[in-house]
Amino acid sequence: MSMAAFTAKFLISNREIVSHKAQRFTEFVKKSANGTLFERPRSKPTWVAHLTYHKPMFGVLQSSYADVEKELNILRNRHLDKRFLFVGGDGLSIIRVNYLLRDKPELYIDSAPTIIPVQGESPHDVFHVMHA
């Protein structure tokens, strides 16, 4: 499977993602109706997410494609040992990242680390295309 085919599985328009979104919505509405929406699961995850914190990058803004590309390349160069790099950000920065993925797939999709944009983050400023 090519990297482009793999990353296409994460697109909001992917058939499976649309189907799962509808299933989750229905499930949450049912749980809300029967008062179990906020019950915690009894099982524990078998893995733990690892976050890497970076210092803010001064002198760059998310309103500039050149700045966002500079930030992406700094992040990629710090994680050359990784295969995938999930990059969170707000709407404007992620739209810039999405256009860069479209325009330069050979750099950001077909070579490691592959950039996978994530809309938003919690808590804010954890792993984000930063602006200062």
Image (tube, grey):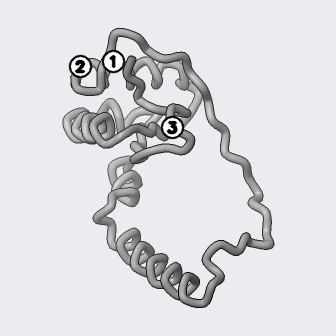
Residue lying at 65% horizontally and 72% vertically, measured from the top left: 38
Q: Is residue 71 left or right of residue 28?
A: left
Callout 3 amino acid? His
Quickly name the residue at label 2: 66
Q: Earlier in the sequence, mark 3 or mark 2?
A: 2
Q: Categorize mark 2 by other alpha carbons within 10 Å: few (<14), some (14-19), many (20+).
A: some
Mark 3 or 1, which is nearer the eye? 3
Residue lying at 48% horizontally and 83% vertically, measured from the top left: 29
State how far apart marks 1 and 2 are (Cα).
6 Å
Residue lying at 22% horizontally and 23% vertically, measured from the top left: 64
* Circles 3 and 2 in contact, beta carbons < 8 Å: no
Quickly name the residue at label 1: 70
Q: Position of residue 128 (x, y in %)?
A: 46, 32
Mark 3 or 2, which is nearer the eye? 3
Quickly name the residue at label 3: 124
Above or below, 2 against 83 in this view is below
Residue lying at 34% horizontally and 9% vertically, measured from the top left: 59
Secondary element at image label 1 = helix
Residue closest to the eye, 96 or 25: 25
Callout 1 amino acid? Lys
Q: Position of residue 25 (x, y in %)?
A: 44, 78
State how far apart marks 3 and 1 are (Cα).
21 Å
In the picture, the quarter occupied by the N terminus is bottom left
Secondary element at image label 3 = loop
* Circles 1 and 2 in contact, beta carbons < 8 Å: yes
